[in-house]
Amino acid sequence: MEFEDIISWTLRIGVVISACLIIIGIAIGVIYPASAPIGAWSINSKINTSSYSFGDIIYGIQAGSAYAYILLGMVVLAATPVARVVLSIISFAISKNKIYTFITIIVLLDILIALFIIPSLIAH
């Protein structure tokens, strides 16, 4: 199997896992509406997802929270392209392509800054 195939399968598997988690969350929410925060199912929901930590999501999964399953699905969906970039860095490094390795590292740093640094700057 080529490294590009591994990258392609990583994207496919990430999207499928994400979709399954979101579908499970929706199903739990339909069957047990009380398993989601008040107002979560409203079109005009005011729930701020940035106030949930990853630990909160894991705790919610253990408690059977529909909302936690949906949030975990969204986290997996967001992590999938990051995994693709990391695998691309490895692929370029193995092929000794220094320019693309460097450019892809910059792309990864941009993504990580956008995910972790900028939101904390905006929140304060």
Image (cartoon, rainbow, N blue to C red):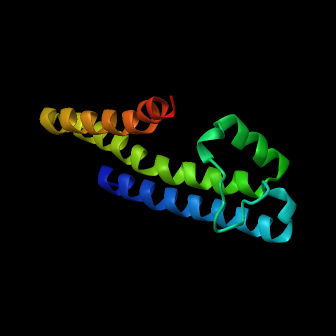
**Picture coordinates of residue 13, whole percent (x, y):** 50, 59
Q: Is residue 60 left or right of residue 92?
A: right
State the image quarter where residue 16 is shown: bottom right
Q: Residue at x 32, y 49 (%)?
A: 3
Q: Residue at x 48, y 46 (%)?
A: 79
**Picture coordinates of residue 115, whole percent (x, y):** 44, 38
**Picture coordinates of residue 25, whole percent (x, y):** 72, 62
Q: Nearest the camera: 116 or 119?
A: 119
Q: Is residue 44 left or right of residue 67?
A: left
Q: Nearest the camera: 59 or 51?
A: 51
Q: Is residue 115 depicted above or below 39 in this figure? A: above
Q: Residue at x 32, y 32 (%)?
A: 109
Q: Is residue 91 left or right of residue 47?
A: left
Q: Residue at x 39, y 38 (%)?
A: 114
Total numbered labels: 0
Quadrant of image for the N terminus:
bottom left
**Picture coordinates of residue 36, whole percent (x, y):** 78, 57
